[in-house]
Image (cartoon, coloured by chain):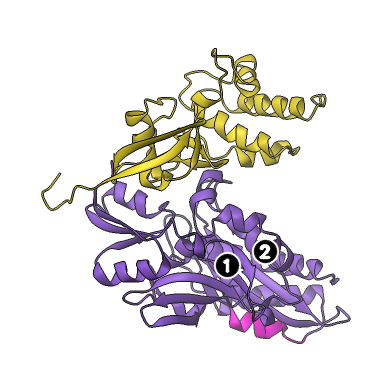
């Protein structure tokens, strides 16, 4: 880095996967950098790094964000959820993770953590969506393996399960 | 790691103004979905940034004491779409910004950033032009308000002066009262795409719902900045509703717009979709008003 760059650090306090944490971070870091490098949360993937592919998606205060275009210092005071926070204490899978397994919605797995976190935001609303609405809500993620159909089915299945209803044929 | 020379985090609007004066070369960053991408591309690499993202005081929608709809500049697209005031009075704005990028972009992207960019394709901007929005800027000498039409100077350039930041976008009551609108984004993909053409129409009908009291239309990507189509508006002003009127209105837009040839679409194609979109959005707006053609 050229000498005209002023090195700046800042202590960032936040809650990650239910735990209050703090670390000193470089102000130039993205949230992806902080979560992967400082907290070793490697479910967050570096894909395009310009907010197009969705592989770095995390939930911040319940909303999905591309952590690659989010400054780490903005995490101050926020509640962050990553895929690691979804599993139970002994590694038990959550319903949406299990649905991805059951529906073979995973092939290489690079897009999966992001898709699952967006699915969490969708499912948390407790609403019933049409296929077209689900497609739109999932449109911030790119998957090069599955062709999306199995992913859509996994989300839809979990949506109906949580609504306590049968999956329509 | 971004190539940021220095980051200044504003803690209040006043603090942001002071930072702007102290660092006139620095780039203001709101949500960052444009600034950080341009930094990654190298276009803004090595720049100082003034972050205003943490300023909750300019986030949210309310009705102010003059009955304007007041949208804080940092309000995200998804919050605008879900907001009960927006849904009640200017639902078309929520629908328009629900077509920006993808879901994660709509959670971070702000309406202030969308307008301060000065780009013609911004999904919020044609609707804000069509509803005669007022831009509020706060500087060291206080607050300055100007019509959105004057805010846009040329492609990529808006009227933000030294030490100023945009703090709100206002929709006056005279603009939103009894008015209903429709937005059509024409683009190649359904998500993560920039508009080839954006068309926003709104209509107010007479009490008996037979006559057009006022119709307004604005386009994105029909010229270097978002633009109204005043000739088309004048064509239908005070006229009784008919299918032929919708036809006349849509054809008249060709007198107003000046689209260009670009790799996204040719001038001729943009003119074609401008006419068709104007007609469809006009008919939809009339229907939302309770009128029949």
Q: Residue at x 66, y 28 (%)?
A: A155
Q: Nearer the viewer, residue B20 or B248?
A: B20
- Residue A18 placement (x, y as % from top left): 52, 31
Indicate the position of residue B282 as horizontal and vertical percent values: 72, 70
Mark toward the start of the polypeptide (2 vs 1): 1
Q: Is residue B98 visible?
A: no
* Residue B291 falls within the magenta-colored stretch: no
Image point (65%, 74%), residue name = B251
Overall secondary structure of the magenta stretch?
helix
Q: Position of residue B71 (x, y in %)?
A: 57, 67
| Subunit ID for the residue under disc 2 | B
Is residue B191 or residue A156 the one in the foreground? Answer: A156
Q: Which residues are magenta?
A: B229-238
Give SS at disc 2: helix
Q: For the point 86% across and 80% down, which residue is it? A: B210
* Cβ atoms under marks 2 and 1 closer than 8 Å: yes
Residue B95 position (above or below residue A10): below
User: Mark 1 — residue?
Assistant: B71
Q: Which chain is yellow?
A: A
Report x, y in % for residue B7: 28, 54
Q: Where does the C terminus of chain B fall, quadrant-wise? A: bottom right
- Residue on which disc 2 sits: B86
User: Is any part of residue A92 visible from this angle?
Assistant: yes
Gap between marks 2 and 1 measured at Cα: 9 Å
**Farthest residue toward the right?**
B208
| Residue under the point 68% across and 67% down | B90
The hue in which chain B appears in the rendered picture of the protein: purple
């Amino acid at each position: 880095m050229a000498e005209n760059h002023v090195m700046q650090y800042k202590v960032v306090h936040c809650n990650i996967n239910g735990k209050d944490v703090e670390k000193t971070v470089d102000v130039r870091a993205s949230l992806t950098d902080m979560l992967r490098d400082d907290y070793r949360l490697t479910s967050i993937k570096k894909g395009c790094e310009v907010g197009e592919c969705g592989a770095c998606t995390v939930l911040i205060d319940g909303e999905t964000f591309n952590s690659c275009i989010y400054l780490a210092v903005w995490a101050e005071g926020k509640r962050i959820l990553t895929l690691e926070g979804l599993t139970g204490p002994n590694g038990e899978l959550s319903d949406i993770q299990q649905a991805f397994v059951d529906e073979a919605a995973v092939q290489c797995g690079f897009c999966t953590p992001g898709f699952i976190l967006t699915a969490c935001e969708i499912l948390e609303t407790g609403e019933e969506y049409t296929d077209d609405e689900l497609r739109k809500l999932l449109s911030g993620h790119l998957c090069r393996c599955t062709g999306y159909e199995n992913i859509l089915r996994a989300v839809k299945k979990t949506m109906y399960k949580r609504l306590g209803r049968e999956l329509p044929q | 790691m971004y190539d940021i020379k220095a980051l200044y985090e504003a803690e209040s609007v006043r603090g942001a103004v002071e930072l702007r004066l102290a660092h006139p070369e620095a780039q203001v960053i709101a949500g960052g979905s444009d600034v950080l991408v341009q930094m990654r591309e190298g276009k803004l690499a090595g720049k100082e940034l003034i972050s205003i993202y943490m300023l909750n005081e300019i986030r949210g929608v309310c009705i102010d004491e003059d009955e304007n709809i007041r949208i804080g500049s940092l309000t995200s697209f998804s919050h605008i779409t879900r907001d009960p005031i927006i849904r009640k009075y200017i639902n078309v704005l929520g629908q328009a910004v629900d077509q920006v990028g993808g879901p994660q972009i709509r959670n971070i992207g702000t309406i202030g950033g969308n307008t301060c960019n000065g780009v013609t394709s911004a999904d919020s901007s044609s609707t804000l032009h069509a509803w005669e929005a007022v831009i509020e800027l706060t500087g060291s000498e206080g607050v300055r308000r100007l019509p959105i039409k004057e805010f846009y100077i040329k492609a990529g350039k808006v009227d933000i002066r030294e030490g100023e930041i945009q703090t709100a976008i206002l929709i006056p009551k005279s603009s939103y009262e009894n008015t209903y609108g429709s937005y059509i984004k024409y683009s190649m993909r359904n998500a993560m795409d920039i508009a080839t053409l954006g068309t926003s129409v709104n209509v107010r009908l007479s009490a008996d719902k037979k006559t057009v009291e006022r119709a307004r239309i604005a386009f994105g990507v029909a010229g270097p900045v978002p633009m109204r189509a005043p000739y088309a508006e004048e064509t239908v002003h005070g006229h009784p509703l008919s299918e032929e009127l919708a036809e006349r209105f849509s054809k008249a837009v060709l007198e107003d717009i000046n689209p260009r040839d670009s790799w996204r679409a040719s001038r001729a194609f943009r003119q074609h979709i401008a006419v068709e979109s104007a007609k469809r959005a006009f008919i939809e707006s009339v229907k939302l008003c309770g009128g029949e053609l």
